[in-house]
Image: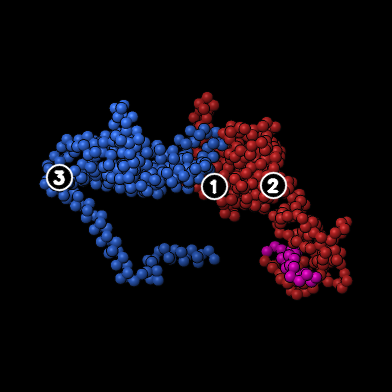
């Protein structure tokens, strides 16, 4: 019984796909062509266009566009925002995913819905919410301005809005992963005498480290690229509250296409680095 | 160390997992908690381990007479082995086994060299010498389960608790590993409780079997006792196959010696406790017609249909030599005599 079965299997994997399992050539080529055309038109060409436009006036113009004080301020603000938002959302995301995946409690499904809220709400609406709450005429506006604290039309508002929009990335990445891993390893650690803290650091966190990094990378990409919510709360004060996406829009509207694309190319570069990191991670974790 | 549990109750929402369960595991014994899924056996094990707490005000857990009900799992010094191993997937076999020692507070933690020495001894004990550098995903199921066992033993537990330890293994490895566990237990004599839904496994290796059903303990005894003298219809059905016959027919056939006045109830008899004798008009025994013979295997299984109540089938098992000597043919009329049987009143719910 066993031997013929093994032979059949070996025969099948060794040879090319049997004719019976193949679609007609026309179908195969058409499907491939559609996919390729789509990829080129909607993904490759725009990406190439960004870099082509950016370098249209030469490398010198490219770097001088990036070196203007306004550009440098925008880049700095974007980096600072990401540097605050990504660690904060990583901590929140891990805490939320840990609670949801490993414990039973009342209101769990409500918490999951709450975490998804930023994905469901339009970023512009999110920005407006912050204006309504922290703006000059908002709920906390009078109290905040009385104490000299500026949130809306200032960097803190940008950080808050970005944090809101990117909140779900880490948690969403970790919840299914942690749920699929179950709680047996944690229970094993506990019966072996580990404290809750030791269990978290030595078992739970190492088990999700790649997922966590992946979530953080996605969170970072969105934090740097966020436009809608930031646009509402920023006030577009050049050199003070303009992030890179806002600065690109400003340059573009001012017909300074080369400079706009130069800054855009930086963001695109970031996206590319993110994608490369992600695929490297995926090959590492596939082992 | 002995384990005692008194009157444990546990509900999950509207579902009752344990409904007043008592348990007594004598020191150094290997005890099986046997029951179908949902019978509460795993919940009982997890309560002993300290991973679940019994419902407030219900029962107590005693280790060697000391109340440990309120002691957290990490302080009970129990070794727990899970059905799906629960090895730390990011740690090597060596680090998995050393885990329980490494997480100790610095004043209780053995020095590095001693940890290494202990892990090597444990690896030898579970016959995995030299595999300390492997990762769990590089091991077979049987090897993983032995790593899990070594990891549990590293903290020198007072009791060993195994939750369906062979459940995820294929049949052959399963049989080997359970015999290995029995020999292993005979060497180290650590009080051990293991959960299983496989009656063959429980009867083969346990000193004592606790049969559970629907959140209650049905019967406790040695494998021999519970198999030969099932206390309830459930145990009869759960341990091996059984025929359920109606009392009136057996009374009429003179196969039921009953002191009771009623002729209600049902009679439970195992297939191998049915003797097949030639049909004699007016003779003793329950008349039946042989309908089918399955003789693949060590025993011949006969399917018989009762003459008095057409459609009621009886399974009997006889040796193949006996089958040959009796020269039985399908559709022969025979009589059945019960060697050993037990009668239960109808109000027994199953």
Image coords of residue B92 (percent x, y):
47, 40
User: Would residue B125 be visible to someone looking at this image?
Assistant: no
Residue B332 belongs to the span the image colors magenta: no
Q: Nearer the viewer, residue A130 or B337?
A: A130
Asked which secondary structure carries label 1, the reply is loop
What residue sits right under mark 1 in the picture?
Answer: B84
Magenta: predominant secondary structure element?
A: strand
Q: Residue at x 12, y 43 (%)?
A: A61
On the image, which quarter does residue A139 sit in?
Answer: top left
Q: Quadrant of residue A91?
A: top left
- On the image, the x and y values in percent for residue A83 come to 31, 36
Image quadrant occupied by the N terminus of chain A: bottom right
Q: Position of residue B85 (x, y in %)?
A: 54, 45
Residue located at (75% from left, 61% from top): B244
Tell me the shade of chain A: blue
What residue span does the magenta drawing correspond to? B297-319
Q: Give the CA distance from mark 1 to mark 3.
A: 63 Å
Instruction: Report the residue at 54% width, 47% height from top.
Output: B84
Q: Are marks 1 and 3 in contact (CB under 8 Å)?
A: no
- The CA distance from mark 1 to mark 2 is 25 Å
Q: CA distance from mark 3 to mark 2?
A: 79 Å
Q: Which residue is mark 3?
A: A254
Please name the color used to draw chain B. Answer: red
Callout 3 secondary element: loop
């Amino acid at each position: 019984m066993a031997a013929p079965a093994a032979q059949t299997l070996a025969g099948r994997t060794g040879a090319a796909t049997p004719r019976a399992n193949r679609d007609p050539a026309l179908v195969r080529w058409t499907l491939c062509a559609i996919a390729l055309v789509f990829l080129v038109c909607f993904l490759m060409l725009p990406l190439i266009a960004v870099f082509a436009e950016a370098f249209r006036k030469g490398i010198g113009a490219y770097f001088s566009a990036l070196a203007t004080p306004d550009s440098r301020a925008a880049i700095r603000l974007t980096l600072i925002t990401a540097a605050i938002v990504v660690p904060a959302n990583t901590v929140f995301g891990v805490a939320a995913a840990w609670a949801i995946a490993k414990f039973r409690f009342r209101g769990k499904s409500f918490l999951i819905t709450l975490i998804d809220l930023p994905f469901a709400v339009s970023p512009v609406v999110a920005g407006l919410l912050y204006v309504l709450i922290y703006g000059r005429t908002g709920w906390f506006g009078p109290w905040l301005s009385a104490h000299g604290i500026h949130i809306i039309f200032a960097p803190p508002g940008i950080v808050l809005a970005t944090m809101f929009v990117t909140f779900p990335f880490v948690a969403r990445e970790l919840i299914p992963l942690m749920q699929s891993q179950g709680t047996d390893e944690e229970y094993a650690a506990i019966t072996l005498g580990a404290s809750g803290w030791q269990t978290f650091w030595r078992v739970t966190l190492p088990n999700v480290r790649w997922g966590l990094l992946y979530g953080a990378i996605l969170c970072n990409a969105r934090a740097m690229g966020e436009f809608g919510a930031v646009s509402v709360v920023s006030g577009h004060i050049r050199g003070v509250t303009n992030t890179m996406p806002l600065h690109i829009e400003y340059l573009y509207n001012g017909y300074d296409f080369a400079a706009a694309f130069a800054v855009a190319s930086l963001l695109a570069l970031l996206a590319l680095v993110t994608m490369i990191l992600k695929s490297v991670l995926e090959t590492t974790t596939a082992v | 160390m002995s384990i005692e549990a008194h009157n444990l109750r546990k509900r999950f929402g509207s579902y009752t997992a344990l409904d007043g369960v008592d348990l007594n595991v004598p020191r150094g014994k290997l005890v099986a908690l046997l029951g179908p899924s949902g019978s509460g056996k795993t919940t009982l094990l997890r309560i002993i381990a300290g991973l679940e707490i019994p419902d407030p005000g219900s029962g107590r857990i005693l280790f060697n007479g000391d109340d440990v009900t309120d002691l957290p799992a990490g302080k009970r010094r129990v070794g727990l082995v899970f059905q799906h191993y629960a090895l730390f997937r990011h740690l090597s076999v060596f680090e998995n086994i050393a885990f329980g020692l490494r997480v100790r507070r610095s004043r209780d933690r053995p020095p590095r060299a001693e940890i290494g020495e202990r892990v090597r001894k444990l690896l030898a004990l579970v016959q995995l010498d030299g595999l300390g550098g492997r990762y769990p995903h590089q091991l077979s199921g049987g090897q993983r389960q032995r790593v899990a066992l070594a990891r549990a033993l590293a903290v020198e537990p007072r009791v060993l608790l195994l939750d369906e330890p062979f459940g995820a293994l294929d049949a052959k490895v399963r049989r080997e590993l359970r015999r290995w566990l029995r020999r292993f237990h005979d060497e180290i004599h650590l009080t051990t409780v293991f959960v299983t839904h496989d009656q063959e496994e429980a009867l083969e290796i346990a000193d004592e079997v606790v049969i559970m059903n629907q959140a209650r303990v049905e019967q406790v005894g040695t494998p021999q006792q519970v198999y030969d003298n099932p206390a309830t219809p459930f145990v009869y059905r759960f341990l091996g196959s059984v025929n359920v016959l109606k009392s009136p027919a057996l009374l009429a056939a003179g196969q039921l010696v009953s002191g009771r006045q009623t002729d209600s109830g049902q009679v439970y008899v195992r297939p191998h406790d049915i003797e097949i004798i030639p049909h004699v008009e007016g003779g003793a025994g329950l008349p039946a017609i042989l309908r089918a013979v399955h003789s693949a295997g060590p025993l011949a299984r006969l399917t018989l249909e009762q003459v008095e109540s057409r459609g009621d089938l009886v399974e009997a098992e006889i040796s193949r030599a006996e089958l040959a000597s009796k020269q039985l043919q399908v559709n022969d009329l025979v009589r059945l005599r019960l060697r050993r049987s037990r009668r239960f009143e109808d109000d027994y719910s199953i």
